[in-house]
Image (cartoon, rainbow, N blue to C red):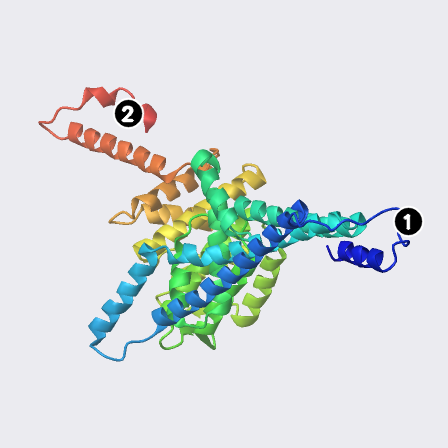
Amino acid sequence: MTAALLRVLIHKIDNTTFGNETPALPQWTGPPHTIVQVQTILFASLAASLFSAFLAMLGKQWLNRYASTDLRGTATERSQNRQRKLDGIVAWYFDHVMEFLPLMLQAALLLLGCALSHYLWEINITVASIVIGVTSFGVIFYIFLITAGAASESCPYQTPGSVALRSLSRRFLPFGASGSDGQTVALESRCILWMLQTSLDKGVRLSTLKYLSTMTALPNIDPTLVMDCFDTFVGCVKVDSHSVLAVQGLGQLAAASALGLLNTLSNLLAIDPTSRVLDDLRRRYAKVFPARAIFRDHQFRHVMNVIRCLLVPSEQRRRFWWNDYEPSAHEHAMVSHNLANLARFGYKRTQRVKVPRWILRFALYSLSLDPPPPTSVIADCLSIIAIDLGLNVGSTALDERYAYIRRMNIILIQNQRASEPGLEPDNRESGNNDKRW
């Protein structure tokens, strides 16, 4: 419009400037359609960014109110008020509202890039191509982040879009919703390793080691976990000549670390018997504890004797007997489980070589106890004996072995009743009793 009016003024001053052409007074018909589109997108981007900033300030105000501490009232009233605030945050989906703010800013940035690309395309294609390329790269990169976050929960690039996409995949593809048991156990072992390396609280370390001692399978175990358990145990005991005693107040932590060391060490021996960590552990054990060390503390005495059998040369194991072994039920179950695993994996690795005599003596000693040990211990001891007899005993579920032992108990009771005067045997089971026994 300005250029057209200037042409009219020039023509009025000198009508020969444009020749026979007479500039007409232009009529305003509104802005071009392209400008309208560009301005619309730009103002939408501006509105989205300003509204997200407005909500962000409101969110900060809401959080300050939630974090504020009441100075009046009793402790019960203040705790009830705090719980009421928390319930309100959950009921009114506060976290979803806060997650909506970054989405608005991302949408505003996308709208700005689209508006600039559309506007510059009408002016210069080269400049517009650069803006379009940068905007397209940003969109593709954001889609990649959403896909990566939806594919794995451990991915740090989590966005609301990835959470929504993962929820949809779990709904329509339930078979891919959760990880395998092996991944879960590996994740737990890494969590335990992190707790032992970062926490100095005695209660936290004690709970962590107790949980570690209950884990019956540790696939892909981190060898560092074995060394951390050993370092924890060494820090809880004192060596006086040939006697090893727990430091006052650290007896439970020493016992828990000994069980954790036995569990991790036996798994590492079964999975990777040539690991360098084992050689390092043997050297450190020989350096800390003398050759004839006596573990006098009852809480870890038997467990450390088992660990010594796993670390010392074979000629010293021959002198190890179980005559005074009186463990708790939990310790007995853990020791029997680890020794059964060692016997099973050693059998597979060495192709039907006999089970070490000290492990077999443990099985025979446990079965000779009166009263008998727990059912899991009996199942592990029978597995050790079966492996020593040359049977290929796989990693059968404990429930199946328990069921078999219960059936054998029923048979023995029936045979005992049959031998007593005045009682008749149960002929339904007696046909195959000898064969099954």
Mark 2 is surrounded, within 10 Å at the Cα level, by few (under 14), some (14 to 19) or many (20 or more) other residues, namely some
Q: State the image quarter where residue 432 is shown.
A: top left
Q: Amino acid at mark 1?
A: Gly
Classify 223 as above or below 423.
below
Identify the residue position indicated by label 1 in the image.
19
Quarter location, residue 246: bottom left
Quadrant of image for the N terminus: bottom right
- Left or right of 113, for residue 373: left
Quadrant into which the C terminus falls: top left
Of residue 9 and residue 278, the one placed in the foreground of this image is 9
User: Going 63% across and 57% down the picture, which residue do you hit?
Assistant: 276
Residue 139 screen position, x and y as percent: 64, 48
Q: How many numbered marks, from 0 up?
A: 2
Mark 2 vs mark 1, foreground winner is 1
Q: Secondary structure at mark 1?
A: loop
In this orientation, which residue lies closer to the viewer: 144 or 417?
144
- What residue is at 42 percent from the left and 61 percent from the top? 209
Q: Label 2 amino acid? A: Asn
Residue 338: percent from left, percent from top: 44, 50
The dot on residue 435 is none
Element on which disc 2 rests: helix
Observer-nearest of 291 and 60: 60
Q: Where is residue 249 drawn, in percent x and y? A: 35, 76
Mark 2 highlights which residue? 433
Q: Does residue 297 show up?
A: no
The correct choice, above or below, for 77 with respect to 372 in the image is below
Q: Residues within 10 Å of mark 1 (few under 14, many from 20)?
A: few
Tell me what residue is drawn at x 74 percent, y 58 percent. Answer: 2
Q: CA distance from mark 2 to mark 1?
A: 125 Å
Check contact, mark 2 vs mark 1: CB within 8 A.
no
With respect to residue 176, does 55 lie above or below? below
- Earlier-in-chain disc, 2 versus 1: 1
